[in-house]
Amino acid sequence: MLRSLLVAGLAALAAAQDYSSDHNTTAITGTWSSGTQRVFPGPGFANPAQETFAYPNTTGVGYAFSDDGWYEIARFRYVANGSHPECIIGTIIWAHGNYNLLDNGSLILTPIGDGYQQVQTPCNKDNTNFIQNYNDTELYSMWRIFTDVTFGPKLHLWQEDGTPVAPLFRLSDQPNMLPQQKLRNNQTTTAGEEREEGAAEEACGNGELEVLEVVEHWTFLDT
Ligand SMILES: *[C@@H]1O[C@H](CO)[C@@H](O)[C@H](O)[C@H]1NC(C)=O
Ligand SMILES: *[C@@H]1O[C@H](CO)[C@@H](O)[C@H](O)[C@H]1NC(C)=O
Ligand SMILES: *[C@@H]1O[C@H](CO)[C@@H](O)[C@H](O)[C@H]1NC(C)=O
Ligand SMILES: *[C@@H]1O[C@H](CO)[C@@H](O)[C@H](O)[C@H]1NC(C)=O
Ligand SMILES: *[C@@H]1O[C@H](CO)[C@@H](O)[C@H](O)[C@H]1NC(C)=O
Ligand SMILES: *[C@@H]1O[C@H](CO)[C@@H](O)[C@H](O)[C@H]1NC(C)=O
């Protein structure tokens, strides 16, 4: 396994000489995932028709890019609250659409309107767990692909404000993604609006229990 990764890495390095652009040592097409590489797009992450998620065991972010201009993102994270550690906010996001590699070196992801997110806000008494549409266009000011001697191709993205995204390792040179079409009707309320408690619970099944588990796991790992 390690050996084949190394060989793949060396091959990518050698091939890099063939590319005039300093952007990439290999194509951006494929499936990429941060950290422990458990968060990545495709059927194992989201079921848009049901508005559900299969919660990964750890937080992270994943991207898939096809060679015909389609992308899919998977993102699962917690935002800490310094003064109220129990008020940690969890967000899990799925979206897909079209991507463009711009001439100025930026990367733009334009969603098609069926993306959604589940937000867990334990300290918001009115609404601790809700689903809402996620249809943000995401601009990454810059992207680079390096070759890691151990892990092979590694994609770096910088957000619009220059903040780097955690390095993304290539799981596959094939994009792991759901069908490239609208997969969810746009019925969910948008940010700020309330959704009936019962509907949210139905949509996430026993997700709440699982999330508590993951919070523990995540807290443990990070301390
Ligand atoms: C490298 O990036 C450029 C765009 O900056 C693209 O045109 C080219 O096809 C890419 N090469 C590979 C191998 O992906
Ligand atoms: C996640 O954790 C569960 C329970 O600990 C385990 O059964 C499962 O295999 C894990 N999944 C992954 C992808 O690691
Ligand atoms: C989602 O965003 C895209 C890009 O801005 C836009 O074209 C589309 O109309 C939006 N869809 C919805 C349902 O808001
Ligand atoms: C932290 O949690 C408290 C209590 O819910 C809240 O009042 C405060 O706005 C939160 N701070 C941040 C930065 O989210
Ligand atoms: C590249 O062009 C896009 C579209 O005009 C713009 O939004 C983005 O900020 C530009 N990137 C940089 C690094 O200037
Ligand atoms: C779809 O969602 C958008 C917000 O993302 C909202 O403005 C629009 O009214 C919704 N359309 C329908 C038909 O529900």
Image (tube, grey):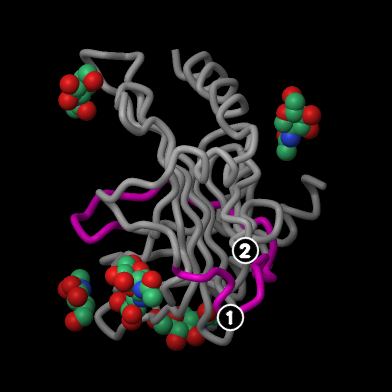
User: Nearest the camera: 169 or 40?
Assistant: 40
Quadrant position of residue 46 = bottom right
What mark, if any, has residue 49 been given in the picture?
2
Q: Residue at (32%, 46%) from the top-left corner? A: 194
What is the quadrant of the C terminus in the image? Answer: top left
Q: Would you place residue 48 above or below residue 87 in this image?
A: below
What mark, if any, has residue 9 been given in the picture?
none
Q: x%, y% of residue 43?
A: 70, 59
Q: Which residues are magenta?
A: 158-186
Q: Would you place residue 26 above or below residue 89 in this image?
A: below
Q: x%, y% of residue 122?
A: 38, 23
User: Nearest the camera: 191 or 201?
Assistant: 201
Q: Quarter containing ligand 5?
A: bottom left
Residue 94 shows up from this direction: yes
Secondary structure beneath dot 1 equals loop
Residue position for label 1? 181
Q: Residue at (77%, 45%) from the top-left corner? A: 2
Closer to the chain start, of discs 1 and 2, is 2
Q: x%, y% of residue 78?
A: 40, 32
